[in-house]
Image (cartoon, grey):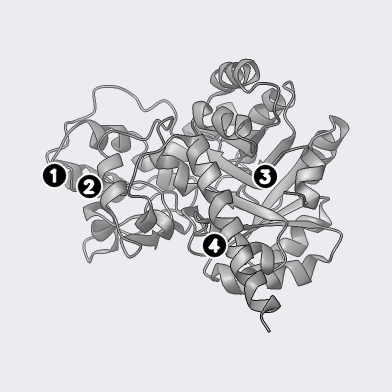
Amino acid sequence: MRTRVTELFGIEYPIFAFSHCRDVVAAVSRAGGMGVLGALHFSPEELELELKWIDENVGGKPYGVDTVMPAKYEGGDLGDAEELLGKLQGMIPAENRRFLEDLLAEHGVEPSTDSAGKALLGWTDQTARPQVEVALRHPIALLANALGPPPADIVEEAHRHGVKVAGLASNARHARKQVEVGVDIIVAQGTEAGGHTGDVATMVLIPEVVDAVGEDTIVLAAGGIGRGRQMAAGMALGADGVWTGSIWLTVDEADTPERALPKLLDATSRDTVRSRAWTGKPARFLRSAWTEAWEGEKSPGYLPMPLQFMLIADALPRIQRSGDGELVTFPVGQIVGSMNQVKPAAQVVYDLIEEYVEAIERLNAITEAD
């Protein structure tokens, strides 16, 4: 396949695969797409090890790194990263802590025996910048930012390293802001997507974003895309490729939690919900007793980013280890209804392309008909 994005990165297929699992990233890049490692869950030291492993196992193929540097979040003026964690912990209300512990106890989740340690992760500018520094020490081809336009100085630094920059946008206004700071690629992500997402559907969003940013800016279609027919539709709407995430949760190489995987495989496209119960910003994940409780009458409500995730960070691994399983959830998009079989990542890439070709041939047959 040849599009502007395949020529830009020298890849065979215009398929970008976001994953927190290094094995998935390397497998997709080796198969002809581009794997993009989500840096959020790693400390700078851990990220260094992950990227070193990818460098050694990607077969010389290009790959990217995705960070989270939100434009707005609670505590943005509270000092450097070392000061920030302690100050933010003190801003979490006791009422919310009690609600969480009562919810966990109700479902038999064992009490915590250690500190979460990664409660803040990369949800802030201060904590994400060290991740960017690590990423730019490696031969990455792409640096992506998942929440809002990246800081202009980060875009400039990436460009100085010869690295292209992508930004996710959930509406046309956000896309224009990304272009204003110098982003090279816009990921137009519809509400069907897993994780942080807006409220405009992919079919509506992609042409709006393509028109808003103009023909000089590359657009990738995202949000509920996990089939070749959907890939063809996104590119028919003006995109140069697709950005995918959820479909890599159920591949052989994925490190998806053991208790979450069966739920993903059994879920239908109606079994997700968009809620603030994970990070404080709207994100789509599996519907469960967790989402129901935070939406219920007894809930104290959500805290703003990054306080909500700081509150629950210690609880998430505890839920995966113990309890009745009713609280188990995971960020995933509506494409989960089609994710009912575990396959190698390379096979998912090839299945996408095969169905894409079939879709294009079907359309060609229609337009060529007498």
Q: Quadrant of residue 323?
A: top left
Taking depth in this image into account, of 201 and 120 the one nearest to the observer is: 201
**Where does residue 58 sit, x and y in percent of width and height?**
63, 23
**Where does residue 77 sit, x and y in percent of width and height?**
64, 44
- Of callouts 4 and 2, the N-terminal one: 4
**Where does residue 114 sit, x and y in percent of width and height?**
29, 22
Quadrant position of the C terminus in the picture: bottom right
Whether residue 262 sits left or right of residue 143 in the image: it is left
Q: Are marks 1 and 3 in contact (CB under 8 Å)?
A: no
Identify residue for label 1: 107
Tag shown at residue 180: none
Tag shown at residue 13: 3
Q: Are marks 4 and 2 in contact (CB under 8 Å)?
A: no
Whether residue 178 sits left or right of residue 35 in the image: it is right
Which element type, helix, strand or loop, lies under badge 2? loop
Q: Amino acid at mark 4?
A: Arg
> What is the CA distance from the residue labelled 1 to the residue labelled 2?
7 Å
Identify residue for label 4: 229
* Label 3 neighbour load within 10 Å: few <14, some 14-19, many 20+: many
Taking depth in this image into account, of 143 and 299 the one nearest to the observer is: 143
> What is the CA distance from the residue labelled 4 to the residue labelled 1?
41 Å
Q: Amino acid at mark 3?
A: Tyr
> What is the CA distance from the residue labelled 1 to the residue labelled 3?
45 Å
Identify whether 124 is placed above or below 225. above
Q: Is residue 123 in view from this perspective?
A: no
- Of callouts 3 and 4, the N-terminal one: 3
Tag shown at residue 327: 2
